[in-house]
Image (spheres, rainbow, N blue to C red):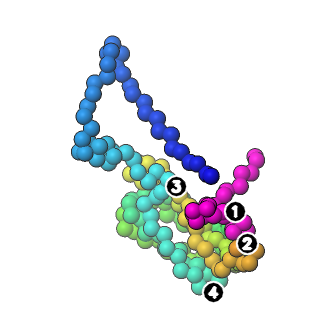
Amino acid sequence: MICTGIALASLLLVPSGSATPPRKAATKATTKAATKAQPSHKSKVPVTVTTSFGEGQATVTLRFDQAVEGAVIGVRGLDGLQVIRVPPVEQTGFAKGEVLTLVVPYTPGPGRSLLAVDIEGTFRGQHRMAVQTFAVGTPSAEQSKAAERHILTTPEGQRIKVMPVKPD
């Protein structure tokens, strides 16, 4: 039997000199407003990235959904894919709605390999970065076996992926 649990903790700040904290009834409106005030998508960037793969080259298109300053864009290969040449991107600021297209020549790795697009910059005064990957090719028999090796099925039929822990 596998048990999972979620621990929730809350912190209540009481102003000094006050014996009991002021109570505020939580209404749907106050909860909704508090939720909207929370920053969202901290680990994502407001950029839509698409790729199309041709014979030995990928066309990477980035559409900026918000203006960005200090943008750094990188392209790299993973799992055996080798990027032959990364097109230089000298521009570091992009307006909302602007589109950047990069043609990236590559050599695919054996089986399934990945093309990774790194994006970093300042969006609305907030520094953000993200990596988006795109699969190239079909998994080899060895890659498929390796992926299935860490998947267990519970008696209820639920599939669970077990991630191996690697010591530092």
Q: Mark 2 or 3 closer to N-term?
A: 3
> Which image quadrant for residue 131?
bottom right
> Which image quadrant for residue 99?
bottom left
Q: Which mark is residue 150?
A: 1
Answer whether residue 16 is visible to the viewer in this image: yes
Q: Is residue 77 above or below residue 45?
A: below
Residue 8 horizontal side relative to residue 104, left or right: left
Answer whether residue 81 is visible to the viewer in this image: no
Label 3 crowd bin: few (<14), some (14–19), many (20+), radius 10 Å: some
- Report the Cα–Cα distance between label 1 and label 3: 30 Å
Q: Mark 4 or 1 closer to N-term?
A: 4
Q: Which residues are magenta?
A: 145-168
- Report the Cα–Cα distance between label 2 and label 4: 28 Å
Residue where numbered disc 2 is placed: 145
x and y percentages locating residue 12 in the rendered image? 39, 28
Q: Mark 3 or 4 closer to N-term?
A: 4
